[in-house]
Image (spheres, helix red, strand yellow):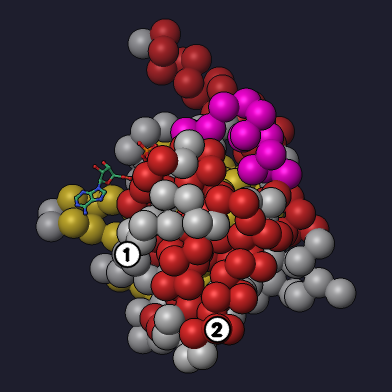
Amino acid sequence: MTRPAPGIQLESVRVRAGERELLTVPALELPERRISVIGPNGGGKSTLLQLFNGLVEPTEGWVTVGGMDTIEQGREVRRQVGFVFSNPAAQLVMPTPQEDVELSLQRTVRDRARRRRLAASCLAELGIGELADRSSHELSGGQQQLVALATVLVLEPAIVVLDEPTTLLDLVNAQRFTGILDQLATQKGLQIITATHDLQLAAQADRCLLIDDGGLRTDGAPQSVIETYRSMARERAAG
Ligand SMILES: Nc1ncnc2c1ncn2[C@@H]1O[C@H](COP(=O)(O)OP(=O)(O)OP(=O)(O)O)[C@@H](O)[C@H]1O
């Protein structure tokens, strides 16, 4: 049985950096299992994603996950919401994948042998068990991306937020990675939220958000949102 998505909600959110308005979202509820976030560079996708686990604090308004405030209950929220950054190297700090995944468990699992077992089985589940003791910096971008995902999944989050996870991947690895995300959503019941410039990946979601110029331009069924984005891009490219 799959778990119900705990639900992210935004209410009257504004994010500013000094005088600059980065993002304004009057109201948004995200109960769907697979959500994609698309839009032009600098539009505010990463800012939106980082609101979901309190990495970015709303200047006004609030963001809740399953009713918990992402700032006031940041620690609990981060237990529910795992974040995978676009550059996996930034997320991998230990010499080997095994050690990196164990590090994720340091706070929650006291027993070292258990940490070791859990980390090994998480890597194995993602099909990268044989990389456990390799040197992390010698792994390919695709392998590093999977290890970064493992460091998040081992904590058993209900929601996984990924910021452009396939940018470093070739077509085969991108498709493999997408297949894994799909399985996590359909078989394990995780909510998967992905910001991406890969419109094929975006099309596989249940709902797609188009973020542009610091706001939510439109959202709904991926094909129609992607079509809106394409027309917008054509108009802008034509000047
Ligand atoms: N800490 C910050 N201080 C000031 N400006 C910021 C900060 N973080 C982001 N910005 C600005 O906010 C805007 C939105 O950035 P964001 O990274 O959310 O866009 P994005 O849609 O993810 O872009 P991309 O597709 O290029 O990754 C950009 O203009 C960026 O320069």
Mark 1 Cα-neighbour bin, 10 Å: few <14, some 14–19, many ≥20: some
According to the picture, the residue beneath numbered tag 2 turns out to be 113
The magenta segment: 168-179
Q: Residue furthest top?
A: 238
Please, which residue is most extreme toward the bottom here? Answer: 110
Amino acid type at image mark 2 = Ala
Nearest to viewer (mark 1 / mark 2): 2
The CB of the residue at mark 1 lies under 8 Å from ligand 1: yes
Mark pair 1, 2: CA separation: 35 Å
Q: Is residue 66 left or right of residue 137?
A: right
In which quadrant of the rendered view does residue 56 lie?
Answer: bottom left
| Secondary structure found at label 1 | loop
Secondary element at tag 2? helix
The residue that mark 1 highlights is 56
The structure residue drawn at horizontal position 42% and vertical position 72%, both measured from the top left corner, is 103
- Secondary structure mostly taken by the magenta-highlighted segment of the chain: helix
